[in-house]
Amino acid sequence: MNINLAVLIDGDNIPSAHVKEMMEEIAKYGNPTIKRIYGDWTKPNLAKWKNMLLENAITPIQQYGYTTGKNATDSAMIIDAMDILYSEKVNGFCLVSSDSDFTRLATRLREAGMQVIGIGEKKTPNPFIVACDKFIYIEILKRKSKEKESEDEKEHEKESVEKITHREIKLISSTITDLSDDEGWAFLGDVGSLLQKKQPNFDPRNFGFQKLTPLIKSTKKFEIEQRENPKSSNKLIFVRIKKRG
């Protein structure tokens, strides 16, 4: 089912550079029927956003900073989110910010049965990340046009890719164990879903892989088996922990 999403963007806290990629990513999870961005549009730091808004049909919400040191944008987003929640026009929210001030909002929306997707930079505090059903880093949405990249940009791209550590391998192993049958096999689709629930920011793209299967293969710690699918021509993929020795 294609759910309706409200996309609320903290303009003060998110760079405008990859808004097109961001909207394409959001479309994978639902239909963004409400798209709003909050900020003080009289300030020059939001000028870069202005052209992006028309191209992506995002409605700017003017929010003056009445008091020095207080984030009026956060308050406006939170009030609007609750109004949208009670209007019952959407099934989920996409909160675009790297600010931990939205942690309680994400929690409250999930308590109301909403799906909550977070998008922010890698500097986003963990409390906000784990308050979401899924959290996506903006850094991985940067479109890689290899033909146009200079060698310096390619090196930077490599540096920004995280390495798979013992922590991730342990997380995958424990998840397979949670779902496995008597022979240790678990359906990869279920493994991916449970990984997301355990760690909302777990995404193969953080490690340079487009999908979970090649990430798991790269660790050389797991066996992968393809099985016939009685309902379609697509194969079913199962995975289990390699036995020692």
Image: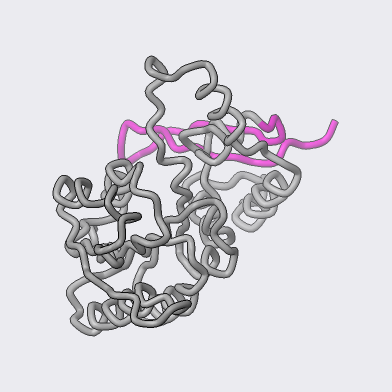
Of the pair 77 and 93, the residue shown nearer to us? 77
The percent position of residue 234, horizontal first and vertical second, equals 36, 33
Residue drawn at point x = 85 percent, y = 30 percent: 245
Residue drawn at point x = 22 percent, y = 70 percent: 62
The percent position of residue 18, horizontal first and vertical second, equals 35, 42
* Quadrant location, the N terminus: bottom left
The percent position of residue 203, horizontal first and vertical second, equals 52, 46
Q: Is residue 104 above or below residue 172?
A: below
Of the pair 90 and 193, the residue shown nearer to us? 90
Residue 174 lies within the magenta run? no
Residue drawn at point x = 25 percent, y = 64 percent: 42
Q: Quadrant of residue 119?
A: bottom left
Residue drawn at point x = 37 percent, y = 64 percent: 95
**Span of residues in magenta:** 219-245
Left or right, 183 with reference to 53: right
Q: Is residue 55 above or below residue 245?
A: below
The percent position of residue 103, horizontal first and vertical second, equals 49, 74
Left or right, 240 with reference to 89: right
